Amino acid sequence: MKTDTLFYKLLKTFHSLLFELTEQPIPNVDDYEFVSVEVKEKAFRFDGVFLPKNSDNPIVFTEVQSQPKNNFYSAFMAEICMYLSQYEPERDWQAVAIFARRSYDPGEAEHFRELFASNRIRRVYLDDWQERETDSWAIKIVQLIVTPSATIPELVANLKTEVEQRCLPELKETVVEFMETVLVYKFPKLSREEIQAMFTLDDLRQTRVYQDARQEGMQQGIQQGMQQGRQEGMQQGMQQGRQNEARSLLLRLLNKKFGNLDCHQTQINNLNLEQMEALSEALLDFNNITDLDRWLTEN
């Protein structure tokens, strides 16, 4: 499962999550601003950077790694050095590498041994958090991400009870939407109805992703059917509505992963329902927009 994009949104929403994962004291949330920073020339982009505002806290560079990568540390350090050269910040810095699994860590690179020894580079292994007891909703979402698919229904059932009983009203919609997004990523072949059946939360039907996708898709289809003015036209319109719903959801997932995709709109609009389902599954392994271009060309 590709976690980079999801983790950027998690870290941006729950500012305390990084400090919880590294088991450091949690600073005042107003002390940091979390941003995505692109370093020019080499077109490096960090998964996220915590920039201190009015305190002596260090800049914190974060990178999420969801698959093995032998040159992970050299690439990460190259990004940081490019940032320091380009922006010339006065504050100190720290790097946090977040691995989906401990086995994805290539190990302490000899070139950077002093940085590991001084904790300048800190490492987090998400699978270490899988069984921990926690009151943090951000950590609970992380646990949902790293939990094997076979045991997801049981965990979701437990989370459902906790959300209904303990979650503050102002956080409830955010937590439910993150849970839904994780399920969509982990089960790309499941239909919306099957995910709902697993979730069994009435709140799911109120989430923005579900409501927007359903409303956009079904309204377009019904309108097309009504314009034809016949029962056959209505049935075709409902079928078109299901296709539009799938397209709307696919576009939202692609936009979350790659940003604005206006230049790809025509190609995506021309996909049939089967192709959209195949693309929804394939995009989990895409690393950049080039992978999307290649898939659209080949399919």
Image: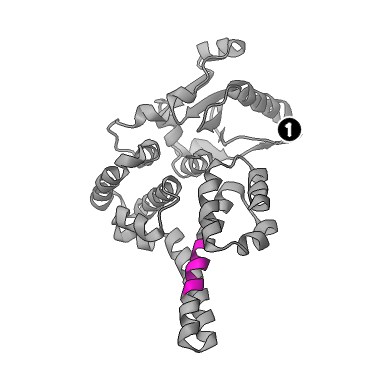
**Residue 243 lies in magenta, yes or no?**
yes
Q: Quadrant of residue 60?
A: top right
Position of 15 relative to 24 (above/below): below
Number of on-image labels: 1
Residue 84 image offset from top left, x and y in percent: 68, 26
Q: Quadrant of residue 33?
A: top right
Position of 68 relative to 221 (above/below): above
**Residue 299 lies in magenta, yes or no?**
no
Could you say which is closer to the camera, residue 85 or residue 123? 123
Q: Which portion, as a residue range, is magenta?
A: 239-246
Position of 278 relative to 48 (above/below): below
Residue 286 image offset from top left, x and y in percent: 58, 42
Residue 147 seen from this side: yes
Residue 172 image offset from top left, x and y in percent: 34, 53
Q: Residue at x 50, y 59 (%)?
A: 249
Q: Amino acid at mark 1?
A: Lys
Residue 79 image offset from top left, x and y in percent: 66, 28
